[in-house]
Amino acid sequence: MVCIRAEKQAEMEIAPSAESVEEIIKPVALPPLVQTYSNPFLRRIEMYAHNVLQYEDKNLRGRCRKLIPVTLLEYNAQERLRSIQKLSKKDKLLDVDVSLQDMIILELLSWFKNYFFTWVDCMECKHCGGETAFSHMSTDPKLLVYTERIELHRCRSCHEFTPFPRYTDLNILLETRRGRCGEWANTFTLCCRAMNWDARFVVEENDHVWTEVYSITQKRWLHCDPCENICDTPLIYETGWNKNISYVIAYSAEEVQDVTWRYSSNHKEVLKRRKNCLEAELLDALLEIRDKKQKELSESRKEYLTKRMLMEVVEFLVEKKPNDVDNKGRISGSAAWKLTRGEIQSEVKSHIWSIHSNYIGDSKTVTIKYCCSQDKYECSADSISINGMDWSSGAFSHESVFRKVEEDWKMAYICRKDGEEKGTLTWKLDVGSNQRGLKSLDVFFDYTTFENGAVDVTICSEHACYILPKGEKQISLSEMQAAREITITAVLKGGKGDCAWQHAQLFRQHLDSSEYPFSITLTFE
């Protein structure tokens, strides 16, 4: 299948040039890896425990921090926290055990998933732009630059090969910003450390990785999967993905911890599958590696880590059961924390554009328009941008859609969320208080589709509904004279393959554009 993200991809670089690496990328200097175990599983644990030391490099963390929109994330987190506090007072919830840090974690996940990193699955042929499929791993030393793993994908049309480098060097990943779960979790864990949070790189033996972040307020580790943009749903893999969990190990510069029990609701079955080594051997190895990592730490820090580890072990003693399979492995928790994960519906701020008589000048028209590249609305009635009103705050309602910014291709558009069959977005206008009487309504609605993606646009008053004809992007209606309320609704659906969610896009435009791909013009008597 061919993933059409925005436009045809440019030819993929095998690796950054030597000049760019020398000038921009300074590899993290880690101490030599000394492996002491003969068991392959324990040797892998040693390797991961060594590799996570790169997260502590000050230059790397500083470079990463500059790429994160910290101020914006903090602002959004404060708004989210205020909403929770307001709801907790309204419903008299007494267990609001979340903090600003918890909210920023959620905002960082969303930003990383929707704006910063790109998933690479189905490749586009760099020779003809055709569909490719994985063929084999390269052994060509000329290709193996800055990585030991290069996938070769063969084109189904021209049969040429396109390489996909699997980088592990975080300096390079901060440049390429693409990959699969390994690259995603590796880079996201670095982002968390750049935010000065205690974070761990988590490896599940059946081929998946993610991150854990320690919540200071809740005094526990939170599961964070940047690929899925999910937080604190550790049973998703066993319950929602039907994975047979066996070993899940978490790694940081200070610790190595067996966290398998957090990710399973059936510990006895898990024990039956753990055959890589004796349990006593695993425990001894983890304690030995942990002691080496903490050798240079202060006594107070060691004491803190020991107390935190003991609290975590106590948590593992109780099996947690999923109470809602439809929500992909949700576990019990405080009401406020469920709210942050969408398990309790927050108050929806519905915006209605009220058109009053005193807005209308000599032109007898009012135009409301939206620029996706700048994410702002403008109303011609006062000829100024409406401060603080982004795509969602100017909408009456929306479900399963978001504004996507592709930093690599410099494009912005609104599409449905990954994994959702459809997304909806509605705007509402109140013209009933206007004494002049509505003469006509003109709507310009730009959209882009790929494969079999589709966008259905409906314009309704309380008397009738009109459908924007297929392939058309503009409609003029003179049958709205008696209307008091008008709604415009777009439904995004269809698409093929893993990128189906991107195959129906609203208001797609280049980030440098100042055009308005969506406009509503009302003409009055």
Image: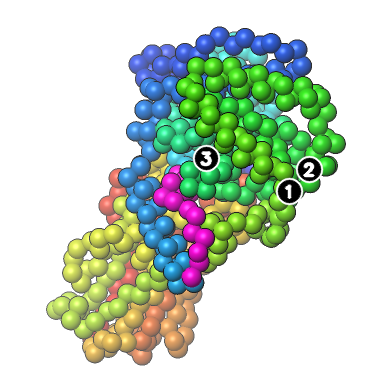
Whole-percent x, y for residue 461 in the image = 42, 83
Residue at the extreme left of the image, as rendered:
362
Q: Is residue 373 above or below residue 377?
A: above
Q: Earlier in the sequence, mark 3 or mark 1?
A: 3
- On screen, residue 380 versus residue 484, left or right, reads left
Inter-mark Cα distance, 1 to 2:
7 Å
> Does the image show residue 508?
no
Q: Which mark is residue 267?
A: 2
Residue drawn at (32%, 87%) of the image:
432
Residue drawn at (65%, 14%) of the image:
139
- On screen, residue 317 versus residue 58, left or right, reads right
Residue drawn at (30%, 49%) of the image:
513
> Which region shows up in magenta?
92-108
Task: Look at the numbered disc 1 and give the secondary structure of its residue.
Answer: loop
Question: Are the two marked residues, 1 and 2, in contact with CB atoms closer than 8 angstroms?
Answer: yes
Q: Quadrant of residue 444?
A: bottom left
Q: Amino acid at mark 2?
A: His
Give the mark count: 3
Mark 3, Cα crowd under 10 Å, few <14 / some 14-19 / many 20+, is some
- On screen, residue 147 versus residue 21, left or right, reads right
> Does the image show residue 213?
yes
Q: Earlier in the sequence, mark 1 or mark 2?
A: 2
Task: Find disc 3 in the rendering and name its residue.
Answer: 214
Q: Is 344 or 180 nearer to us in this picture?
A: 344
Whole-percent x, y for residue 338 in the image = 56, 59
Task: Find disc 1 in the rendering and name its residue.
Answer: 319
Mark 1, Cα crowd under 10 Å, few <14 / some 14-19 / many 20+, is some
